[in-house]
Image (spheres, rainbow, N blue to C red):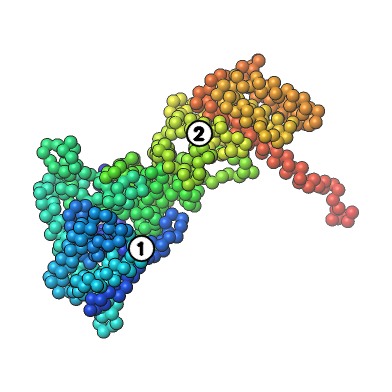
């Protein structure tokens, strides 16, 4: 299904490239401009501004260039009119010719010149003849090498030969020779001839992708764009059988996984396009460009829809959400009904040397995916404590990783740890599949919570993640069990939840009695109270007596209110003498943390309401107002 979906992507979005497989689009940073008599004129840089992520950067302009019909990792296989620096100019600076590579690059250059001469003779094209004159003149080549060196060109950069020839009586204008139709047709013939020779020994069979009987590809093209996720810069393979241990029944190489040459070209073309960074794929409307790749924790998440669409579901959980998703979170059923019937695909990949590793694969209807994303954000919601009661925007993947990462880790380093890739995969599976996060994420969140202090302990995103984990475990282990709400529910009688609320009340009591302190009772007892309330709360009860005594003297109203809440919680815990639970499970530790958070939010909301009522002007007594009839 995965390979078939990739091939279908190429048929839908890359049909023009499939029709002309002899060419591919690649960045070409330099043109060698040549005069009509074959003399060097200049190295012309070809750059453009492009938005990558959220930044505007300058990148080389792309050009439709010849595609190699064979694997170029070994041997001499030049391309026509546009190739790497080593092929055009041979050995030169250490930046593109390392010690010991001189003979290799000299051979590449000789092969390039020979191909250009051969094609110029076969086509009699004036552009190719001009390029050959330049290539045969060592003094002109040296001028071009020197200017490229001044521009600090790197080895492997593509250079297009651009003869400046007059056209229809107009002044000479530099155009890449490969854009001339006679030259393009000559390369097509060359490509198809060598491509057929390459796969001739593959024989015939049934293609796994199309199901049709026909010739089979012996090898498949490399997939590019994985060097920053663990793959080789030269490319990786999704299907590759290059050792005897991987082969069976006498089948050689990729005949162990039979795919026709055209379908092999299609799925590789699709992967290369999906791995392209930034906004590049057209949506349903002509002016809409969408991303197909998002990198997190050493993985690339590739996503697309069967039919062109302007929606980007993956962006909803990675970046700030769009208006449509905002409507979905608020339960706008009409927004779901308006979504067209479409299929959504998501694959997580990474590189391992020369291999492409598929970490996860998902296909689902677009409406189903959006409904799950709505559920994801709903399940992550938590009443905020430190934002004046206003709802916070939904957390992104980065923000969820942040609340699980020690504070000493710099923001730019979040996501680089090996464990982060596992967590990101878990988040994505939960958001798109509804797969429970489990105890590992919950343990990490609680571990961070135990060592945090002050307002960092009240991070709503972390508590929302804890709530989601606890509810997932509740739904999975105890169907119809106690689920944790978004805000305080005074009807909940769970001991761990009540213990969390009780600690928050003790914390508020100390603040009322002593004001701001460097170390609070919560800082001292939070970890102990979360794991073993029976050990922590007797000590807290002793401390509270002194605080209540002081408060009774200085703030009798506050004393009465807090003492009432203490008695209320303790009476809910037990009918008689308080007997606190011991050794809370991981899920109950999560309930404890949620209870503490809910009570803090409730207390601060009461304070805000009290302040607003005292600052508001007193209500006017209508009996004191002048009467419009009497004039009094």
Q: Secondary structure at mark 1?
A: loop
Between circles 1 and 2, the one closer to the viewer is 1
Q: Residue at x 36, y 48 (%)?
A: 228
Q: Nearer the viewer, residue 629 or 478?
A: 478
Residue at left offset 11%, top offset 38% = 250
Q: Is residue 161 left or right of residue 433?
A: left
Q: Which residue corresponds to mark 2? A: 445
Cβ–Cβ under 8 Å for marks 1 and 2: no
Element type where label 2 sits in the image: helix
Name the quadrant containing residue 161. Answer: bottom left
Query: Image quadrant for the N terminus?
Result: top left
Label 2: how many Cα within 10 Å (few below 14, some 14–19, many 20+): many
Please provide percent x and percent y for residue 53. Answer: 43, 54
Quadrant of the snapshot with the C terminus: bottom right
Residue 485 seen in this snapshot: no
Q: Nearer the viewer, residue 290 or 33?
A: 33
**Residue 1 in view of the camera:** yes
Instruction: Pinpoint residue 455: horizontal percent, then vertical percent.
Output: 61, 38
Residue 62, given in percent of the width and then of the height, sits at: 32, 63
Image quadrant of residue 167?
Answer: bottom left
Q: Which residue is mark 1?
A: 152
Asked if residue 581 lies left or right of residue 632, the reply is left
State how far apart marks 1 and 2 are (Cα). 48 Å
- Between 132 and 442, the residue placed more toward the observer is 132
* Residue projecting furthest to the bottom: 169
Q: Earlier in the sequence, mark 1 or mark 2?
A: 1
Mark 1 neighbour density, 10 Å: few (under 14) some (14–19) many (20 or more): few
Residue 361 versus residue 332: which sits nearer the camera? 361
């Amino acid at each position: 299904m995965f390979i078939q979906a990739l091939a279908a992507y190429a048929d839908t979005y890359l049909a023009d490239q499939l029709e002309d497989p002899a060419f591919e689009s690649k960045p070409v940073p330099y043109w060698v401009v040549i005069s009509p008599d074959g003399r060097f004129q200049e190295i012309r840089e070809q750059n453009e501004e492009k938005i990558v992520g959220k930044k505007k950067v300058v990148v080389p302009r792309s050009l439709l260039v010849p595609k190699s019909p064979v694997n170029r990792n070994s041997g001499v296989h030049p391309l026509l009119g546009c190739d790497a620096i080593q092929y055009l100019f041979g050995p030169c600076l250490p930046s593109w010719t390392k010690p010991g590579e001189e003979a290799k690059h000299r051979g590449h250059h000789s092969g390039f010149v020979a191909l250009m001469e051969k094609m110029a003779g076969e086509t009699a094209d004036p552009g190719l003849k001009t390029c050959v004159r330049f290539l045969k003149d060592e003094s002109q080549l040296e001028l071009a090498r020197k200017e490229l060196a001044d521009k600090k060109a790197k080895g492997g950069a593509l250079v297009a030969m651009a003869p400046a020839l007059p056209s229809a009586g107009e002044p000479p204008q530099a155009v890449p020779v490969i854009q001339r139709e006679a030259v393009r047709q000559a390369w097509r013939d060359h490509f198809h001839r060598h491509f057929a020779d390459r796969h001739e020994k593959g024989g015939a069979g049934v293609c796994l992708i199309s199901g049709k009987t026909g010739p089979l590809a012996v090898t498949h093209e490399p997939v590019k764009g994985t060097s920053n996720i663990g793959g080789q810069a030269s490319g990786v393979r999704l299907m590759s059988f290059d050792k005897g241990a991987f082969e069976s029944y006498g089948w050689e190489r990729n005949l162990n996984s039979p795919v026709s040459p055209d379908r092999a070209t299609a799925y590789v073309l699709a992967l290369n396009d999906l791995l392209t960074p930034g906004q590049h794929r057209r949506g349903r409307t002509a002016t809409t460009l969408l991303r197909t790749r998002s990198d997190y924790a050493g993985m690339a998440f590739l996503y697309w829809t069967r039919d062109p669409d302007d929606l980007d579901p993956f962006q909803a959980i990675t970046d700030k959400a769009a208006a449509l998703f905002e409507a979905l979170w608020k339960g706008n059923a009409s927004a779901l009904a308006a979504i067209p019937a479409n299929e959504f695909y998501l694959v997580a990949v990474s590189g391992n040397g020369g291999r492409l590793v598929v970490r996860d694969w998902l296909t689902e209807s677009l409406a189903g995916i959006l409904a799950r994303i709505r559920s994801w954000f709903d399940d992550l919601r938590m009443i905020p404590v430190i934002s004046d009661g206003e709802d916070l925007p939904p957390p992104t993947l980065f923000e969820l990783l942040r609340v699980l990462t020690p504070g000493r880790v710099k923001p730019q380093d979040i996501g680089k740890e090996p464990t982060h890739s596992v967590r990101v995969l878990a988040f994505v599976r939960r958001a798109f599949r509804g797969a429970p996060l489990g105890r590992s994420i919950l343990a990490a969140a609680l571990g961070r919570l135990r060592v945090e202090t002050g307002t960092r302990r009240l991070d709503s995103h972390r508590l929302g993640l804890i709530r989601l984990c606890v509810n997932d475990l509740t739904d999975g282990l105890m169907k119809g069990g106690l689920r944790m709400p978004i805000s305080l529910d005074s009807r909940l009688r769970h001991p761990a939840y009540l213990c969390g609320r009780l600690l928050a009340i003790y914390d508020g009591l100390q603040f009322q009695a002593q004001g701001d302190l460097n170390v609070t009772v919560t800082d001292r007892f939070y970890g102990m109270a979360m794991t073993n309330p029976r050990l922590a709360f007797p000590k807290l009860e002793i401390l509270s007596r002194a605080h209540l005594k002081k408060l009774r003297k200085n703030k009798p109203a506050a004393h009465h209110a807090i003492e009432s809440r203490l008695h209320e919680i303790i009476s809910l815990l037990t009918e008689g003498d308080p007997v606190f639970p011991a050794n809370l499970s991981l899920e109950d530790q999560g309930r404890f943390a949620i209870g503490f958070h809910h009570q803090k939010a409730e207390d601060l909301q009461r304070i805000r309401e009290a302040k607003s009522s005292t600052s508001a002007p007193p209500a006017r007594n209508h009996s004191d107002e002048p009467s419009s009839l009497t004039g009094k």
